């Protein structure tokens, strides 16, 4: 994995750590969620496989090292630092919550314990990769919940911020509960079901709708999904009905979804095509999906793109990657940040979840319920193969179902209780006294 895929200051700090003789010091960093995004009662942890691939493959090529040598910021870096980068590998530990786990504010997603340079360099990549898939999976889960058991197909690659983001966004959407994606590469790479219809250009390329529908039916057979809204939805539905089977169904991509779906359903049913499905797509989000179903719209499948692929209403996560402790010569030193609204909590941690609350405790404490942070990499080696995407998807289904109905609703509600253990609170007090000479404000 490209060692330059990071912010410059990670690398200048690395050079500084090296020159200061700190390369052997062990640092522990945590990726934690400071606040939940707007309109979210929880988020779903995503992106762990990509984080693992990054850590296990992190290295620098000779060309990359030569590039760094030529930057003015490294003009004073010792030659030995570049020799160090030549043999760089991640040799530390990674603890993480399983992918697909619901999380709440003030909870760590993952912990890295490694020699300080190895722990520092991954910050930028991890914040980007994990935050993005966490946001998309969480948004997808909301849309899927609103669909009340009807399939949701992810259509978002063309609206994603890059094609690569479209692929990982499709993966995260499937993790969050979408039934399929339109992204063929995501289907190939992650074994996600793929689905698609035809574009308006298909219909417009023929002299009439009937010819376009007939040819698509001939080409795709029972997989044919006819697009109805190029000209007139009702007239197109009648032409599709006249052709009969084979037919998967039809798609409406614009206009009055409620009225159009009712009209189309009546036309298809009258023609004996009761099994033909109606899909709608176009500027849908969880609220429009919910409202359409509440109004009784006979819609069988939803295609949702932009709102999922960029988590449009909450496109960023207040995740932070902060040092929480150091170990120098076998002696631990706890670290924390105390700036206004951006304070951090010292010490490596564990999350215990039971039926009534989450307890954020010190690492090594015993607690009640499920311990969420688990070893993934130890000593630079993967402990065991990660659960596959289907297993992570099943974890989403089971764990979200265990949340209270209030947390699963679209509107925000009282937050799930997240408290600190007594030992962690005591550590917070001692660390503040050591660093600032004052006790925490009650």
Image (tube, grey):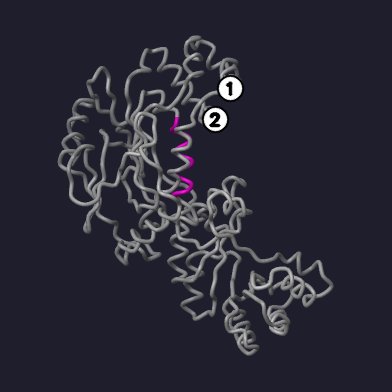
Dot 1 crowding, Cα within 10 Å, few <14, some 14–19, many 20+: some
Residue at image coords 67%, 71%: 224
Report the quarter where the C terminus lies. Answer: top left
Name the residue rendered at 52%, 57% in the picture: 308
Query: Closest to the observer: 84 or 426?
Result: 84
Q: Against 16, is 91 above or below? A: below
Q: Mark 2 or 1 closer to N-term? A: 2
What's the residue at 46%, 60% (across, down)?
Answer: 177
Quadrant location of residue 355?
A: bottom left
What secondary structure characterizes most of the magenta part? Answer: helix
Disc ID at residue 400? none
Q: Residue, x 53% and y 79% (percent of image)?
A: 297
Check residue 350 for magenta coloring: no
Q: Is residue 117 above or below residue 105?
A: above
Mark 2 in CB contact with mark 1 (< 8 angstroms): yes
In the picture of the structure, the residue carrying the numbered disc 1 is: 64
Number of labels in the image equals 2
> Disc 2 marks which residue?
2
Q: Is residue 100 above or below residue 259?
A: above
Image coords of residue 239 (percent x, y) = 73, 82
Provide residue 300's location: percent of width, then percent of height: 54, 75
Bounds of the magenta segment: 122-134
Q: Is residue 39 above or below residue 117?
A: below
**Relative to residue 396, is residue 275 drawn left or right?**
right
Give residue 429's position: percent from left, percent from top: 18, 34
Residue at the farthest right position: 207
Q: Is residue 125 magenta?
A: yes
Residue 170 lies left or right of residue 431; in this view the side is: right
């Amino acid at each position: 994995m490209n060692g330059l895929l990071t912010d410059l200051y990670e690398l200048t700090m690395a050079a500084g750590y090296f020159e200061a003789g700190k390369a052997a010091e062990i640092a522990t960093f945590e990726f934690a969620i400071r606040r939940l995004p707007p309109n979210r009662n929880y988020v779903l942890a995503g992106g762990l496989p990509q984080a693992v691939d990054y850590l296990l493959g992190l290295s620098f090529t000779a060309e990359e090292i030569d590039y760094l040598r030529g930057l003015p910021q490294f003009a004073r870096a010792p030659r030995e630092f570049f020799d160090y980068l030549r043999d760089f590998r991640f040799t530390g530990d990674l603890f993480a919550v399983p992918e697909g786990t619901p999380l709440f504010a003030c909870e760590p997603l993952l912990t890295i314990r490694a020699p300080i340079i190895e722990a520092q360099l991954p910050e930028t990549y991890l914040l980007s990769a994990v935050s993005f898939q966490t946001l998309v999976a969480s948004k997808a889960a909301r849309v899927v919940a609103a669909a009340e058991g009807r399939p949701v197909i992810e259509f978002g690659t063309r609206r994603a911020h890059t094609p690569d983001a479209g692929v990982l966004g499709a993966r995260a959407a499937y993790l969050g509960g979408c039934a399929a994606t339109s992204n063929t590469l995501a289907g190939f790479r992650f074994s996600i079901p793929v689905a698609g219809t035809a574009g308006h250009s298909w219909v417009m390329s023929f002299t009439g709708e009937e010819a376009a529908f007939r040819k698509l039916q001939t080409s795709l057979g029972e997989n044919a999904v006819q697009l109805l809204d190029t000209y007139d939805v009702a007239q197109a539905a009648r032409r599709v009905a006249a052709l009969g089977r084979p037919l998967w169904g039809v798609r409406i991509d614009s206009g009055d979804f409620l009225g159009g779906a009712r009209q189309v359903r009546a036309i298809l049913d009258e023609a004996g095509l009761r099994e033909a499905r109606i899909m709608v797509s176009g500027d849908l989000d969880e609220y429009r999906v919910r409202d359409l179903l509440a109004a009784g719209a006979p819609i069988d499948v939803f295609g949702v793109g932009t709102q999922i692929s960029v988590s449009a209403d909450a496109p960023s996560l207040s995740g932070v990657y902060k040092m929480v402790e150091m170990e120098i010569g076998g002696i631990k030193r706890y670290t924390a940040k105390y700036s206004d609204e951006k304070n951090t909590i010292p010490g490596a941690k564990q999350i215990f979840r039971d039926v009534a609350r989450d307890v954020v405790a010190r690492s090594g404490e015993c607690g009640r319920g499920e311990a969420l942070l688990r070893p993934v990499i130890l000593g630079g080696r993967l402990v065991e193969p990660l659960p596959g995407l289907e297993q992570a998807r099943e974890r989403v289904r089971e764990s979200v179902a265990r949340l209270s109905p209030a947390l699963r609703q679209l509107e925000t509600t009282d937050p799930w209780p997240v408290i600190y253990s007594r030992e962690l609170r005591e550590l917070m007090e001692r660390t503040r006294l050591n660093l600032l000479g004052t006790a925490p404000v009650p």
